[in-house]
Amino acid sequence: MDVTLEETVVRLLLDRHATLAVSESCTGGMVAERITSVAGSSACFEGGVVAYSNEAKTALLGIDAGLIEEHGAVSRPVAEALAEGARFRFGSDFGVGITGIAGPGGGSIDKPVGTVFVALVFENGSLVNELHLDGDRRQIRELSCDAVMRMLIEQCSGVE
């Protein structure tokens, strides 16, 4: 029987007695849905925020509006701030932030459709990956979620 990425994430979090919170923009709650689809996830998943608008990012997650204005909502600093906001707001061990352009519109020369930033913050640091994904809207969102799961697996596997 194949084990899904989210099942692996939940097992690793449970093994380490660690908790997770997410802040999602372009994925619209898909990361939270995938994690909570796993039986037992309530013991490790604290919650999530879908912050699609810039106003929601600032009001719900405490992101500085100047940061968004300076770098754009789809950027490395904003993804990291989303992750930090989720971790802080929910008091979790790990925080995930994800922001991007799923398409089909909204892209630019500098940030084309498929540009996604995924961030993971934890007590001793953070990781932010810039992705350039191909596919339709649904595929880009799913691939973004997969990237988050892989980041969590890698980080949790290295934590003793």
Image (cartoon, grey):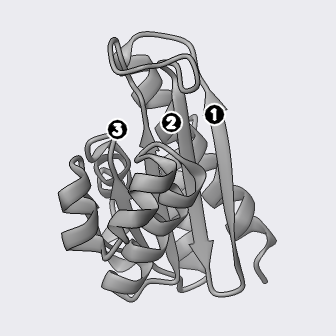
Which one is in front in this view, the residue at disc 3 or the one at disc 2? 3
Compared to residue 83, the image places residue 123 above or below, namely below
Q: Kindly report the distance in space between the C-alpha atoms of the residues bearing marks 1 and 2.
A: 8 Å
- Tag 2, which secondary structure? helix
Name the residue nearer the viewer: 119 or 81. Answer: 81
Q: Is residue 142 left or right of residue 112?
A: left
Q: Quadrant of the C terminus?
A: bottom right
In percent of the image, x 27 and y 47: which residue is there? 29
Name the residue nearer the viewer: 153 or 98. Answer: 98
Q: Label 1, on which residue? A: 131
Query: Can you tell which quarter of the image residue 132 is in?
Result: top right
Q: Amino acid at mark 2?
A: Ser
Compared to residue 78, the image places residue 101 above or below, namely above
Q: Label 2, on which residue? A: 144
The crowd level at tag 1 (other Cα within 10 Å; few <14, some 14-19, many 20+) is: some
Name the residue nearer the viewer: 101 or 93. Answer: 101
Residue 74's spot in the image, x, y percent?
A: 46, 42
Residue 136's spot in the image, x, y percent?
A: 40, 10
- Tag 1, which secondary structure? strand
Q: Amino acid at mark 3?
A: Cys
Q: Quadrant of the N terminus?
A: top right
Compared to residue 33, the image places residue 55 above or below, namely below
Q: Amino acid at mark 1?
A: Leu
Q: Label 3, on which residue? A: 26
